[in-house]
Image (cartoon, rainbow, N blue to C red):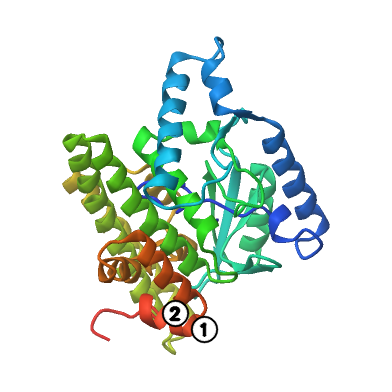
Amino acid sequence: MVQMLTDRPARGAARVLPCLVLALVSGCGTTYLMQAGGGELQVLDARRPIDEVIADPDTSPGLSARLTTVRAAREFASSELHLPDNKSYTTYADIHRPYVVWNVVAAPEFSVEPKRWCFPVAGCVAYRGYFSEQHARQFAFALEQQGDDVVVEGVPAYSTLGKFADPVLSSMMQYDDDELAATIFHELAHQLIYVPGDSEFNEAFAVTVEDAGLERWLVHQGNPERIRRYRDSAAQGQQYIALLSTARARLAHLYGSEVPVEEMRAGKAQILAALAVDMRALEVRQRSRYPVYDEWLAGGLNNAMLAAIATYYECVPGFKRLLAANDNDLERFYAAVRVLAQRPRAERHAQLCSASPRAPGD
């Protein structure tokens, strides 16, 4: 986007490229383009330099302290992570709402692959973002009426790929300091390398950079307890992702079979019900809760939710192997990713990702 949903349920929401950037001339539809353009202009108009906000006597001590941390993380991103050194995340915008955009992800009733919307510049992407929750839900409702599985997620942050100087948003303040730094690393990674039309490649690359960047940031901070908590949290989040990935593989196997529609529908319900039980059991074992998963479980799991997770995480193991193969040297890693980015999608995915979900044992 350019958030799992928060750009990951384990630590996040979804991020999105606004249509203003995706289609400056055509392709989004007039209504969609107008809401995207108007929403982006409101965000840009609300920007204030972070230094100015910190120095403002009307700024609360809490916000001032957090923005001081943001400023340090932004400097670290360029100096130590070799991410773009530009005006992005050097300003702050109070948008007076909990989310900046709402993402719609959809998948057909019997498919684990997300629907995609295609635009100039960004290519085909696996989500569609709205600055208005009402408009997002209206679009989602229309898709549901067509028989699609749909999920709508509030998004605290998004990227314009450096087309504009993206600000730190008030909606991002719901993150703790570590997640806030990770989000900045993630979004700057999109500015560094972005392949039009390959959401899975782009998001997994950014997730890999944010994970590597956050661990280095915590080491730089010199707080062993925070490092331990981060690693524990990452391991817990990975257990959820594994459950969702396994269920998605089982569904893909079912959808690829030739069973009658009603039998397929019943099988789908059975797999998703079992996944819900497993997720609740994992909550008990971990003694932890993720609000986004709670919302999904309360509303009923579906293909779109699993597709959204896969967009962010399916290719991450391959990217992490590539980082390790380059001795965890980020600059060498970026060079290797740029080489892959020039190859055909099928070749990239064969090296980094599961070519298609497979049921265990297939």
> Could one spot residue 180 in this view of the protein?
no
> Quarter of the image holding residue 300?
bottom left
Question: Which residue bears the numbered disc 2?
Answer: 348
Disc 1 element: loop
Q: Determine the residue positioned at 59% across, 55% down.
A: 161
Local crowd at mark 1 within 10 Å, few (<14), some, or many (≥20)?
A: few
Q: Which mark is residue 164?
A: none
Toward the front, the furthest residue is 79
The front one of 53 and 288 is: 53
Q: Position of residue 142 (x, y in %)?
A: 68, 59
Spatial CA distance of label 2 from label 1 is 6 Å
**Residue that badge 1 annotates:** 344
The three-letter code of the residue at mark 1 reads Pro
Compared to 140, does 315 lie above or below? below
The residue type indicated by label 2 comes to: Arg
Identity of the residue drawn at 73% across and 53% down: 20
Q: Quadrant of residue 174?
A: top left
Asked if one can make out residue 152 in the rendered structure from this viewpoint, the answer is yes
Against 223, residue 115 (above or below) is below
Total number of numbered discs in the rendering: 2
Residue 129 screen position, x and y as percent: 63, 53
Q: Please, is residue 62 above or below residue 164 in the view?
A: above
Q: Nearer the viewer, residue 203 or 129?
A: 203
In the shown orientation, is residue 137 left or right of residue 62?
A: right
Q: Look at the image and tell me in which quarter the N terminus lies.
A: bottom right
Q: Nearer the viewer, residue 333 or 233?
A: 333
The answer to whether 173 appears left or right of 294 in the picture is right
Q: Name the residue rendered at 47%, 31% in the picture.
A: 173
Dot 2: what SS? Answer: helix
- Mark 2 near mark 1, Cβ–Cβ under 8 Å? yes
